[in-house]
Image: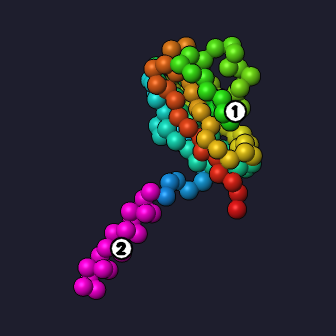
Amino acid sequence: MKRIMFVVVVFASLLLSACGGAAPSDTIDVTLTDFQYIPNSFTVPAGKDITVNAQNSGAVVHNFVVMKLGADAGTEFDDEDTPNIYWQVQLEPGASSTTTFTAPTDAGEYQIICSTPGHLIAGMVAKLIVVAGE
């Protein structure tokens, strides 16, 4: 009986740790392709400087646009969405870039999109999860 209980406890611990989500990081490593971000979710600490290492492996210009908290570009990025940009970087095909930005101070989930026409509706979206500091 003790052996079965031990196995159940170990299994439950592994299961719960897998569901815990990614730990916040001050570095984002991302590949921009036609038409996705790999990976497509990033967890960062609020208010900290974040280094973005981006590589465009696609055939066209792509960008990594972090929208402000609560902003949603819908299915097509247009001029009305420009004031809702928190931060962005653009990469030519085959280019790579290392840049930094300061993460928002408000915890929450921020939309990341590619503003190149047709890319948002094609599904080139990701999310930035900002978590409060310790």
Residue 1 sits in which quadrant? bottom left
Dot 1, how many residues are within 10 Å of its Cα: few (below 14), some (14-19), or many (20+)?
some
Which residue lies most toward the front here? 1
Q: What element carries label 1?
A: loop
Residue 84 sits in which quadrant? top right
Task: Name the main secondary structure of what is drawn in magenta.
Answer: helix
Q: Mark 1 points at which residue?
A: 68
Within the magenta stretch, is there residue 7? Answer: yes
Q: Is residue 52 above or below residue 16?
A: above
Identify which amino acid the numbered label 2 is placed on. Answer: Val
Q: Where is residue 90 drawn, in percent x and y?
A: 62, 25
Identify which amino acid the numbered label 1 is placed on. Answer: Lys
Q: Name the residue under label 2.
A: 10
First in sequence, mark 1 or 2: give its number. 2
Would residue 87 be seen by someone viewing this image from the given angle?
A: no
Viewer-side residue, 88 vs 75: 75
Which residue corresponds to the image point at 57% horizontal and 21% vertical from the top-left? 74
Would residue 34 be seen by someone viewing this image from the given angle?
A: yes
Viewer-side residue, 59 vs 2: 2
Dot 2, how many residues are within 10 Å of its Cα: few (below 14), some (14-19), or many (20+)?
few
Viewer-side residue, 11 vs 42: 11
Within the magenta stretch, is there residue 134? Answer: no
Q: What distance separates the C-alpha of mark 1 from that of mark 2?
A: 41 Å
Q: In this view, does 61 lie to the left or right of 122?
A: right
Q: Where is residue 69 drawn, in percent x and y?
A: 68, 36
Q: Is residue 72 above or below residue 102?
A: above
- Residue 24, numbered circle: none
Magenta span: 1-19
Which residue corresponds to the image point at 38% horizontal and 62% vertical from the top-left? 15
Q: Is residue 54 left or right of residue 67?
A: left
